[in-house]
Image: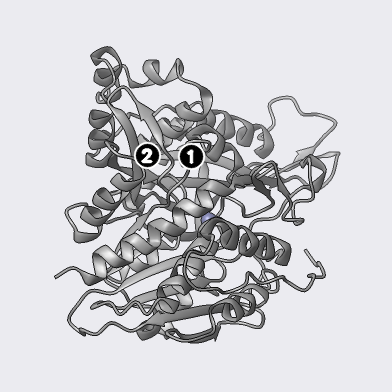
Amino acid sequence: MARLCPEPTLPAVTDGAIDREGECTELLQALIRNACVNDGTKESGGESRSADLLAGVLEGPGLDLETYEAAPGRRSLVARIEGTDPTAPTLLLMGHTDVVPVNPEHWSRDPFGGELVDGEVWGRGAVDMLNLTSSMAVAVRRLARSGFRPRGTLVYLAVADEEAVGEWGADHLLTHERDAVAADYVITESGGIPLPSPAGLKLPVIVGEKGALWGKLRIGGTAGHGSQPYRTDNALVTAAEVVRRLAEYRGEARIHDVWRHFITSMGYPDEITEPLLSTEGFDEMIAGLPIGMARQFHACTHMTFAPTVIEGGSKINTIPDLVELEVDIRTLPGDDEDAAMAELRLALGDLADRVDYVPFRYDESSQSPIDTPLWDTLATVTQRWYPGSETVPYLTVGATDSRFFRRAGSTAYGFGLFSEAMTFEDYGVMFHGDDERIDTASLGLSTELWEAVADDLLRRD
Ligand SMILES: [Zn+2]
């Protein structure tokens, strides 16, 4: 989406008691106005605009800056505070600079206006994830300017192309510029939304994500004349039944470790906890939940099949002999492609032999352990803002750049700090949704969080 960017107004750098919230708000507004919309094509994104903007913000004493351009316009920025002890761990704070497309007609305000209205910044990327990209930059700048000299190295990465498949961003950097971004610990989106529970406030830390298997089903038939359809072998009619079966398929819930830990810590009454931790009664239990939560809980515990694109037929008076159906399959930790194919066959039943599966792309599920120093740091420092809260592990059902880092051996979590104005339900709806916005208090909080995490983790003996 082409858009002229207004000259960004950069937050002023001053020492001492700077208003984190104000600084972060201005930076977020500028990043939203840059409109780095990634539609999945190589030519889209234009993240160079935001990489350059952030370089301007970060330039100065205490920080080494480097940019990497995987393809024209697809620039990522790395800023580094080198640690004093080469054996100490490295922490990477990673925010993406691209955003997904919008349908402006469905928005109440300009999606790329970055307006500040009643304490909220509006615009595409306000929660996914320019909010954190901004607060990480502000925190790193504040640390550098304050003379922060950690034992371990602190790296900030403003990365391109997260909203497609990372080919021009994280995947590229880890393949070709590994030394620039390699880290023991990585924090990126998307966790930390305060979640009230009967057992107190919980702060979900994303420790893993589902896998994605993308491909198409080729559904054959026999060509014939549209004027005599009786008992014809119409590929479109077969495809309709395939779609129906995928939509109605109800696989068994998988009660994995992360899910068990999460549900157990919520302190729900037994009549809720037991079915949520059992393959029996799980579906009946979630049927009564609010729809956003039900979808999350279902996706978190099931391999899912979403038919999304269909193409077929050639002429109104011809019975089609081929229909192609794209299906988005999401797998759980531990599943491989064979497991996905076996469950697909189960969903299709006796139609399984009538279709051919053509895979396009497979991204395996990934997961990090929770018995790590980074987990301990998050659990400890969050007490400053939410005393008595508890960090709990959670599995994201989407994909983030964490997967590339987990495969490279890093411990990667999705986290952030938000005010209680941001609810789990609102956050879920605004993610890639309309009227995306964030309260400025959350921006100040996450800026403080990054400073505290870096201080706790990198200075620790
Ligand atoms: Zn994101």
Residue 2 vs residue 52, the one in the foreground? 52
Q: Position of residue 278 (x, y in %)?
A: 25, 23
- Looking at the image, can residue 322 be seen? no
Instruction: Please tell me which residue is depicted at 71% across the width and 63% down the height of the picture.
Output: 35
Q: Position of residue 83 (x, y in %)?
A: 28, 82
Query: Which quadrant of the figure has residue 256?
Result: top left
- Residue type of the residue flagged with mark 1: Phe
Q: Position of residue 6 (x, y in %)?
A: 80, 70
Nearer mark to the viewer, of 2 and 1 = 1
> Mark 2 sits on what residue?
343
Instruction: Please tell me which residue is depicted at 82% across the width and 34% down the height of the picture.
Output: 226
Residue 65 vs residue 35, the one in the foreground? 65
Is 456 on the left-hand or right-hand side of 24? left
Residue at far left of view: 461
Dot 1: element: strand
Q: Position of residue 380 (x, y in %)?
A: 24, 50
Is 310 on the left-hand or right-hand side of 411? right
Are circles 2 and 1 on residues that touch, CB within 8 Å?
A: yes
> Mark 1 sits on what residue?
305
Dot 2: element: helix
In this view, 278 is above or below 317? above
Distance from label 2 to label 1 (Cα)? 10 Å
- Residue type of the residue flagged with mark 2: Glu
Query: Which quadrant of the figure has residue 52?
Result: bottom right
